[in-house]
């Protein structure tokens, strides 16, 4: 359960928050002053603070300054009914995650809270890179006993005392973000912010603004000055996932940050100095992109100071069962059930090549835990609804991936439009993947950006698509 602390002296705002966040997933605590909020934080240990700028007693900006001395990683969203550029910029420079103007746009409020809670989890959860996970004292762990993974663990340890830029390479689903977070957790910046940006998931025309901010009037819709992720993450670590999808203009700005620690906001000409460690990741062969002149050679060498290559799961078959046991234990505990893999199921897991890598295995084990008829997970629990084994499914054409859906599309194809069939295929595949957009995009053979655009098209057409944690989507069928 996420803990949300609201610091605001207005009863109407407190009432509004209690109604908006009336959810079993969120525990809301309120304080009416900055002083009271600062007293509550050490005991409550909230995941997120929402705070008014103008309050009786200590104002929000001073409270934020003192809060940062208590916890530099705690996300804080500032709120005000008297929004000015200066107060907003001051709040962001003090380390606020974001700011909102009253009265609230409720959908925007919920989205910002969701994003901030996601960032909080990424900073708070410590990633262990011990090869054997025998302790119950970890939140997340990178599992692997093979030689390739042992080499990755060694590099993580060697990077702990360094601020060197690191490039993590590997196929989609191999766990690149876990490795990035392990580097951060064991670094000298572990007490400072950590922000993860998926460069492929943000529209190209917005990525530069997301990273570096923009000035008022820089482009259509830029009604206020905006602080970017690099400024928000000053003194911390920024993880740029799928960096190979960046446009040349954004690549140039990233190169400048790595060379001099400076950049300008979009539409601005004032150099801004930051101290940020960059960890990047890609599932694309950047050397080929450099040769094709779609990725800057000088940026590649700046990023590739230390390269951590994460092996595909098919290259580390000895780790499959250890990973499977790990995921079964994790999801069984989360669902309050007892589950164990049968001998037959274990043989089936070893036989599959897992082209979706660790993410695909995790989703398969999650599904198996949920649908197993009893405490033992048999082969039937990790066989698709049409009866085909995993390996047989992967050998089928792309259209046959619809069989991965939890409920197979049964309506006849004849007489239906291509758009309707495509819609069903995408939604059923996403349902099978338990909302994991990246995994669904891999199965469908499309980019995550295309999948996101398709989901946006379907929203309102009898389908409610709600973002959830860790790149997931929650689907609800309405009407």
Image: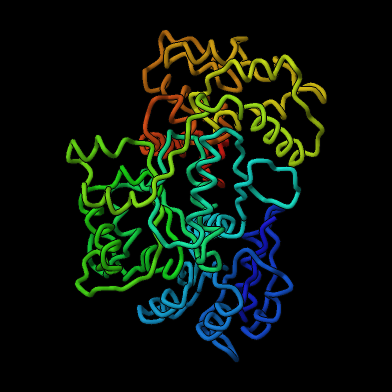
Q: Is residue 427 visible?
A: yes
Q: Where is residue 235 in the image (x, y as percent from the top left)?
A: 44, 70
- Which residue is at a point 38% across and 70% down the rendered structure image? 275
- Which residue is at a point 50% across and 18% down the rendered structure image? 402
Q: How is the image coloured?
A: rainbow
Q: Where is residue 134 in the image (x, y as percent from the top left)?
A: 74, 43
Image height of 43 relative to 266, above or below: below
Depth order, front residue of 36/250: 250
Q: Can residue 479 be seen in this view?
A: no
Q: How many labels does the image show?
A: 0
- Which residue is at a point 69% across and 20% down the rendered structure image? 346
Left or right, 171 with respect to 374, comes to left
- Which residue is at a point 52% across and 19% down the rendered structure image? 353
The quadrant of the rendering that contains the C terminus is: top right
Q: Quadrant of residue 368?
A: top right
The quadrant of the rendering that contains the N terminus is: bottom right
Q: Where is residue 206 in the image (x, y as percent from the top left)?
A: 31, 53
Left or right, 166 with respect to 479, comes to left
The residue furthest bottom is 57
Image height of 63 relative to 306, above or below: below
Q: Where is residue 395 in the image (x, y as percent from the top left)?
A: 47, 11
Depth order, front residue of 275/103: 275
């Amino acid at each position: 359960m996420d803990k949300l602390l609201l610091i605001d002296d207005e009863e109407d705002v407190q009432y509004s928050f209690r109604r908006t966040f009336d959810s079993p997933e969120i525990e809301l605590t309120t304080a009416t002053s900055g002083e009271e909020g600062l007293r509550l934080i050490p005991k409550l240990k909230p995941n997120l603070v929402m705070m008014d700028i103008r309050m009786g007693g200590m104002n929000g900006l001073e409270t934020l300054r003192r809060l940062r001395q208590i916890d530099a990683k705690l996300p804080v969203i500032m709120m005000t009914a008297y929004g000015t550029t200066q107060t907003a910029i001051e709040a962001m420079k003090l380390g606020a995650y974001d700011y909102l103007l009253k009265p609230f746009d409720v959908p925007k409020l919920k989205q910002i809270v969701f994003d901030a809670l996601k960032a909080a989890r990424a900073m708070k959860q410590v990633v262990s890179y011990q090869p054997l996970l025998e302790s119950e004292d970890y939140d997340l762990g990178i599992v692997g006993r093979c030689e390739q993974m042992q080499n990755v663990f060694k590099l993580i340890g060697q990077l702990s005392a360094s601020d060197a830029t690191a490039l993590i390479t590997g196929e989609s689903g191999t766990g690149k973000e876990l490795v990035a977070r392990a580097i951060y957790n064991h670094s000298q910046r572990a007490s400072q912010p950590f922000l993860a940006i998926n460069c492929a998931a943000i529209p190209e025309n917005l990525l530069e603004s997301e990273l570096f901010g923009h000035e008022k009037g820089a482009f259509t819709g830029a009604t206020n000055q905006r602080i970017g992720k690099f400024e928000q993450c000053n003194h911390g670590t920024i993880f740029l996932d799928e960096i190979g999808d960046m446009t040349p203009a954004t690549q140039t700005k990233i190169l400048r940050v790595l060379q001099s620690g400076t950049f300008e906001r979009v539409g601005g000409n004032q150099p801004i100095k930051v101290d940020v460690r960059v960890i990047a990741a890609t599932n694309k062969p950047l050397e080929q992109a450099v040769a094709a002149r779609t990725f800057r050679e000088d940026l590649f060498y700046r990023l590739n100071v230390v390269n951590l290559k994460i092996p595909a799961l098919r290259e580390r078959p000895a780790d499959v069962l250890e990973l499977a046991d790990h995921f079964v234990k994790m999801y069984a505990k989360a669902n309050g059930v007892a589950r164990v893999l049968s001998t037959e199921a274990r043989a089936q897991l070893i036989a599959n090549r897992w082209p979706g890598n660790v993410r695909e295995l995790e989703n398969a084990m999650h599904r198996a835990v949920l649908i197993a008829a009893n405490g033992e997970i048999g082969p039937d629990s990790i066989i698709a609804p049409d009866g085909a084994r995993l390996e047989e499914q992967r050998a089928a054409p792309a259209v046959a991936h619809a069989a991965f859906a939890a409920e197979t599309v049964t309506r006849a194809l004849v007489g239906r439009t291509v758009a309707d069939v495509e819609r069903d295929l995408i939604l059923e595949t996403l349902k099978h993947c338990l909302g994991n957009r990246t995994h669904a995009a891999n199965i469908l053979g499309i980019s995550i950006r295309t999948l996101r655009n398709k989901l946006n098209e379907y929203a309102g057409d009898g389908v409610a698509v709600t973002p959830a944690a860790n790149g997931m989507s929650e689907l609800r069928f309405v009407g």
